[in-house]
Amino acid sequence: MDSIATQFFIEQALVSIRYLYVTSYVWLPFLLFVLFIKLWVDYLHTRVSYEAGSVLLEIKLPKEIRKSPLAMELVLTAMWQKGTMTFLDTYWKGKVVPNYSFELASIDGQVHFYVWAPPKMRNIIEAQIYAQYPTVEIYQVEDYTLKMRHDLSKTSMWATYFILEKPDPYPIKTYIDFELDKKASEEHQETITDPLSMTIEYLGSLKKGEQAWIQILFRAHRSYGIDAGRLIKEPDWIKGVGGVDEQIELILKKYKPVKPEKDQPVMPIPQMTEEDKTILSALNRSKSKYAFDVMIRGLYIAKNESFNPTSIVGLIGAFRQYDDKTLNNFKLGMFTDFDYPWQDFRRMRRSAREQGMLDAFKRRSFFYGMYQYWAQPKPFILTTEELATIFHLPGGVVSTPTLDRIASRKSEAPANLPI
């Protein structure tokens, strides 16, 4: 009986192969054309991104910043620029939506804030940051990642992606949930909890010979279709399948009156639970914000004599304070090591992952270039409110001694100076 089934399966497979061969003149040119378009668009994006170059800006913080993360949200709103796409722009000029990177780096325990961006966007970014944080200082600096090499005889490293556990429309816990949008008097400053302080404290706890990098790559979200080089249109995060509107409708559907069947009593409408009220409020608030495509990487690298496995645990927990079990939370995506020894013969796969992650960090490549969507299928959505929560310029409530701050506060010159 088994031999008959096997013979039948082989015959059917041969028939299918013959059918594909006979009809190849129909589907093969189409498949080759689609492949050519994808490779051509990827090539244009890579070339344009390379030719445009990049600039790395370090933000030096003063001793006191009396601004809530709302200030950074306003900066992000100004950076949200998706532009217009025509077929000429996409398939000939290689035009792309600008992408940026917010970065937190600890080098020997010294904590730094960086912004990586295309050079043409530098003036806009600096102007917006100075408008919201007039006491900070911004400098163009050498790329801190370029000095690092993947050399197992001298260094050890671990890296990961951070992704969302639930669908994109569900937001994480934001600065509004932490009540950082409310002004507090000086005597109540100690009651303020800045969620970013946990990440900065971890970064500041590293010792000499250790480094930890957190890279938040983002670009303005748009619905990418054939005009932007996508043959299959990506759904809009609000109105598309699985979007915000659909999530809201699924909740409201539970509380709509049900028409009774004949001779059946009318069932009372159940009262909305507090959990669903919280979700609806959060979804509607997110709906009113600008959205970004986001990818987050974390990397820990240290000299072999300084390598501390506990520091990896700290990096894993760097985003745990934003978790909200009712709404959304971060979890680990791909990471460089493996659970079992037999998954990685002679450490070849782990070394390849480590080299890839380190190179991707240096290139800031994910949306475009050679590491486009590498080891992570797609970006996720964060609104300006969520993005400003995980990266903003902290005030005096963050007292990490290794946080690099300006020694003196800048002030304007007196108006009565002699000329």
Image (spheres, rainbow, N blue to C red):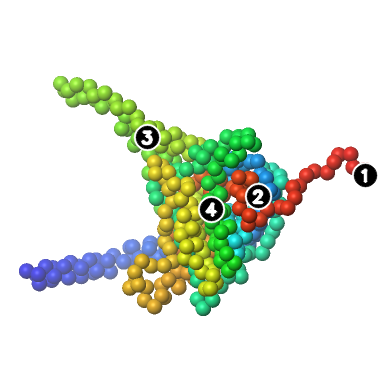
Q: Secondary structure at mark 4?
A: helix
Q: 7 or 390, which is in the foreground?
A: 390
Q: Which mark is residue 419?
A: 1
Give the alpha-carbon distance from disc 1 to disc 3, as whole Å.
Answer: 65 Å
Q: Amino acid at mark 1?
A: Ile
**The residue under label 4 is which amino acid type?**
Thr
Quarter of the view holding residue 118: bottom right
**Residue, disc 4:** 199
The three-letter code of the residue at mark 2 reads: Ile
The picture places residue 271, in percent across and down from the top left corner, at 32, 27
Q: Kindly report which numbered mark, 3 or 2, lies closer to the viewer in this rendering.
A: 3
Distance from the alpha carbon under mark 1 to that under mark 4: 48 Å
Taking the image as shown, residue 29 lies to the left or right of residue 160, namely left
In the picture, measured across the screen, residue 405 lies left or right of residue 180, that is right
Q: Would you call the spot at circle 4 few (<14 residues within 10 Å), some (14-19), or many (20 or more)? A: some
Q: Earlier in the sequence, mark 3 or mark 4?
A: 4
Q: Which residue is mark 3?
A: 276
The residue indicated by pointer 2 is 125
Q: Establish if 213 lies above or below 261.
A: below
Label 2, secondary structure: give it: helix
CA gap, disc 3 to disc 4? 30 Å
